[in-house]
Amino acid sequence: VHYRRSNNPDKAIEYYKKSIAVNPNNPFPYFNAGVAYMHKKDFTNAEKIYEQLVTAIPDYPEGYHGLGQVYLRTENYTKALEFTQKAKEKYKNLDTKKYFEEAGKRDVYIADCSYIEGQINYRMKNYQKVVDVFFDSFEDMKSIRYYGLSDFATIAYFANEELKNTNPKQYEANLKKFETIGIKI
């Protein structure tokens, strides 16, 4: 971790690989190696290490989240959405005794997945899905004071604006929902 944080991802990856060889059942070296590869913009190796993590420890959500990030960055939105949604489900069903460190931030991780899901759907021009995911996650995000809530509201607003000409009834229904939760547009 020291090498990764001190901007030496190659050295960090070297040690993460050694750690994986010693204990392939520890998710952290896989995840951190993936982060180091992502930092280098080496999406091919990031994808490989996250796939190894998903194979070695299939109930650990970060492998799916990492794959979602790889696919988002490489503009493979269908796969990005698939793995982000899988990560979200894994977080919701997290074994809090086994992954006690993640348990403390589980609600934030779920919110992150919803926010990313909204971004992906916007890029895929699934505008109503953006709005739906926003409203489905709004109360939970609000209760934890999620840092990206206002950004997500903005994305949902612009998604709804895209519906104005193609689906005016849905657009109006969404406007009412925004007003109901206190967002004036």
Image (spheres, rainbow, N blue to C red):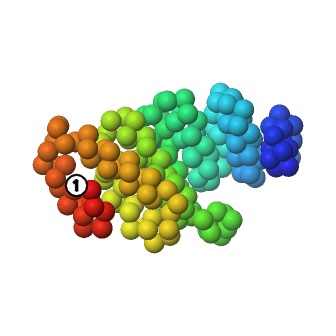
Residue 15 visible somewhere in the drawing: yes
Give the quarter of the image for residue 6. Answer: top right
Residue drawn 16% across the image and 42% down it: 167
Q: Left or right of 34: which side holds 148?
A: left
Residue drawn 34% across the image and 50% down it: 156
Q: Which quadrant holds the C terminus? A: bottom left
Q: Left or right of 108: which side holds 181?
A: left
How many C-alpha atoms fall within 10 Å of the one at disc 1: few (<14), some, or many (≥20)? many
Q: Left or right of 107: which side holds 166?
A: left
Kind of element beneath mark 1: helix
Q: Percent x, y for residue 61?
A: 58, 52
Vertically, is 65 above or below 150?
A: above
The count of marks equals: 1
Q: Percent x, y for residue 126?
A: 31, 39
Q: Residue furthest front?
A: 185
Q: Could you say which is closer to the camera, residue 21 or residue 73?
A: 73
Vertically, is 39 above or below 42?
A: below
Q: Percent x, y for residue 123?
A: 40, 36
Q: Percent x, y for residue 106?
A: 57, 64
Residue 110 visible somewhere in the drawing: no
Residue drawn 14% across the image and 45% down it: 168
Residue drawn 27% across the image and 61% down it: 184
Q: Which residue is mark 1?
A: 174
Q: Left or right of 93: which side holds 159?
A: left
Q: Amino acid at mark 1?
A: Asn
Q: Residue furthest left?
A: 169
